[in-house]
Amino acid sequence: MAVIRDMMPVFELFQPASVEDATALLREHGEQAWVMAGGLDSFDWFKDRVKRPAVVVDLGGIEALKGIESTADGLEIRAMTPLTDVVRHPEVREHYGLLSKAAELVASPQIRNQGTLGGNNSQDTRCWYYRDGWTCYRAGGNICYADTPTSMNREHAIFGADRCVAVNPSDTAPALIALDAKMVVQTADGERVVNAEDYFIGPGIDIMRMTVLQPGDLLTSIRIPSTWAGAKFYFEKVRDRQVWDFPLVNVASAIRVSGGTIEDARVAVNGVAPYPMRLTAVEDAIRGASQDEATAERAGEMAVRGARPLRQNAYKIPLMRNLVKRSIRVEA
Amino acid sequence: MADIEITEAIDPGVSRRNFIKGVIAAGAAVGSANYMFRGVGALFAQPTSPGAVERLITLTVNGQQRRVDVMKQETLAMTLRYKLGLTGTKLGCDRSECGACTVLLDGVPHYSCSILTQSVRGREVKTIEGLAAEDGTLHPVQQAVVDEQGFQCAFCMSGFVMSTVGFLEGNPNPTRAELAHGLSGNLCRCADYDKILTTMERAAENMRQA
């Protein structure tokens, strides 16, 4: 879409100072309200005139939603903590290096200084048909422009498509899934804690949302249990250019090895489905196996079983296979 | 009631045609106001909503208190360039994809095209205009640009300089690779990166000596 260099269309702005005020505003304005975290996803929508909310609730002024602290069982990262703080936090680096590595590979330094962990996990998909304002399924229409014989769909899904073939673009999401993180969601009925892998939903559940968040809900914090602290981690992101870009495919794994045998593992990939995928079948298959080339090979083959490529994205199958393979044979 | 009073107050000299034209114009004004100020109704209904923001705000820019009238949807880059006259901050893509608009907020580099002016109330904004000392002595990073003739067309320069100032604050002694990583959120369409990195290495040296 042509870049429009002028003001965004008018919206009413609220910058509440507490979660209570924010949820009250969201309840009051209902579906008219747009929740804004760092704003980096939001402003693209507004500037392109594709999404035109009447009311924007900016969470940037809520101090209670920022910061990282140790808990009895791990770490609690508030949703509005900038990615840079996640990358630099000594405890994240020391015990949950998987997350700091993933966060450091997001976008660019300035974006990481402003973009938040909660926002990175709640961002919308990057399908350009959708983002350019085409009235596709996800936008409330009844067609997918990315899944036709002439579509440009190199970046789209090889798994989990259901009418919509867009992918989830988050880098930190698979890391959080591999770390067995819990997402704390503030709903009208109170607090709800959701496993990271269940926070993301596919188009089969609701084609217009990426996460379990309903209008009026807020992701307030992310809890990382100590279960996987200090495990062997692997994160790799493959993208077209090394800054700014979203992943073509990324992989995150946490593995506990004892005497050359894989005791337990969690593996997740993103960029291949409308939601970050936890590879439970792979985890089950490698648990108890020796950590060697053959196991890694088998894991990679297993991971891509059932993939359904579109016109231009069959390359994602070997890419995902090899990334999963690398993530299993992770060096000591 | 009000309608009747207005009707009675109309000068008998007003022709029927002019009266109708006037009504049409008023209707058009009301219609476009509704278009231009969509959403404002929500505020009028809730004058004391928590988190409501005001148009007249005070910003701290380059150490000065600046009173400014900003719209709710206005980005910091717009305010700096078109309201405060600080045109050293450039707008390239307006989409957080080029870095030309980089400024420091409390010492940290941000894309000023992608943050609302309303969000920087109470924060220290620093632009390229605020780097040199009062007496005109250039900032060590600016001096390095002059010494090394670091840029070709230099449209991206103020963004690169602000990123460098912010980056060197936390990493005064970077390797060339670390510097490249730190400045990776800025683009140069002349692709003069090698010279820019050499310049910024000299900038780091200047900073250490300063």
Image (tube, rainbow, N blue to C red):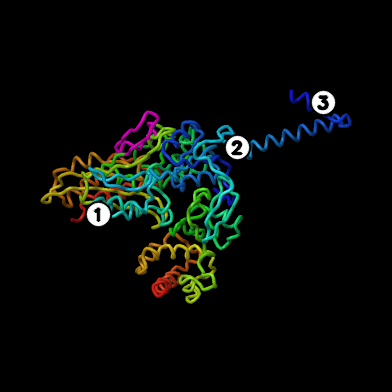
Circle 3 sits in a helix, a strand or a loop, which is it? Answer: helix
Name the kind of residue labelled 3 in the image: Glu
Q: Are marks 1 and 2 in contact (CB under 8 Å)?
A: no
Q: Is residue B24 left or right of residue B184?
A: right
Quickly name the residue at label 1.
A94
**Is any atom of residue A308 visible in this view?**
no
The label on residue A14 is: none
Quickly name the residue at label 2.
B38
Check disc 3: other Cα within 10 Å, few if <14, some if 14-19, many if 20+: few
**Is any atom of residue B188 visible in this view?**
yes
Q: Is residue A155 above or below residue B34?
A: below
Check disc 2: other Cα within 10 Å, few if <14, some if 14-19, many if 20+: some
Quick one: A19 or B128, which is closer to the camera? A19
Disc 1 and disc 2: Cα gap in Å? 49 Å
Name the kind of residue labelled 1 in the image: Glu
Which marked residue is nearer to the observer: mark 1 or mark 3?
Answer: 3
The label on residue B8 is: 3
Chain that bears disc 3: B
